[in-house]
Amino acid sequence: MTYLQSRVAEHPDNQPIGRIYQNSAGADVLIHLPQHYWNYVDWSEARGDIDFQHWVTHTERHPFEDWSLSQLLMYWLWLDECRRHRYGHPTPTNTPPEGYEPYGERANDA
């Protein structure tokens, strides 16, 4: 959440918004994402491309370093949208996400 709050300074119109999902134990967990990420989730689910509840439980079971669940989900959503733009698949807008690189993905080990 701290990371997301730090991003608000750069994009004050995109406050993190919380939605409740269930974790793998069935307990409620609050996921905080900026509104444009929720818009992407809603668009993808409406198309039947993703089941975000499954993403939540899968991501919870596969943590990465000290990243929060919200940060990891935000990363996976960003990567999914980048790949859609790269491969010419349908996207909710013609504008690629911030940080998009059209000719490949940066190595994750940098």
Image (spheres, rainbow, N blue to C red):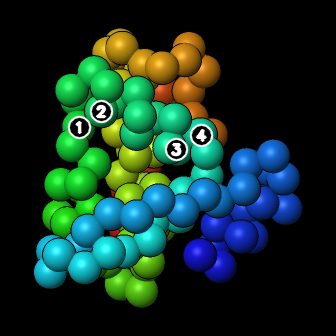
Please indicate whether residue 70 sits to the left or right of residue 28 in the image.
right
Quadrant location, the C terminus:
bottom left
Which quadrant of the figure has residue 64? bottom left
Query: Going from the N terminus, do you reach mark 2 or mark 1 first?
Result: 2
- The answer to whether the residue labelled 1 contacts the one labelled 4, judged by CB atoms less than 8 Å apart, is no
Inter-mark Cα distance, 1 to 4? 16 Å
**Crowding near the residue tagged with mark 4, few <14, some 14–19, many ≥20 C-alpha atoms within 10 Å:** some
In the image: residue 27, left or right of residue 40: left
Q: Are marks 3 and 4 in contact (CB under 8 Å)?
A: yes
- Of residues 14 and 106, the one nearer the viewer is 14
Three-letter amino acid code of the residue under disc 1: Ile
Residue carrying label 3? 37
Q: What residue type is labelled 4?
A: His
Is residue 97 depicted above or below 30 in this figure?
Answer: above
Q: Where is residue 84 in the image (x, y as percent from the top left)?
A: 35, 25
Q: What residue type is labelled 2?
A: Glu
Residue 34: x and y in percent read 61, 52
Provide the residue designation for mark 1. Answer: 50
Q: Is mark 4 on a helix, strand or loop?
A: helix
Disc 1 is placed on an element classified as: loop
Marks 2, 3: nearer the viewer: 2
Q: How far apart are marks 2 and 3 (CA)?
A: 12 Å
Can you identify the residue that label 4 sits on? Answer: 36
In three-dimensional space, the C-alpha distance between marks 2 and 4, rounded to whole angstroms, equals: 14 Å
Amino acid beneath label 3 = Tyr
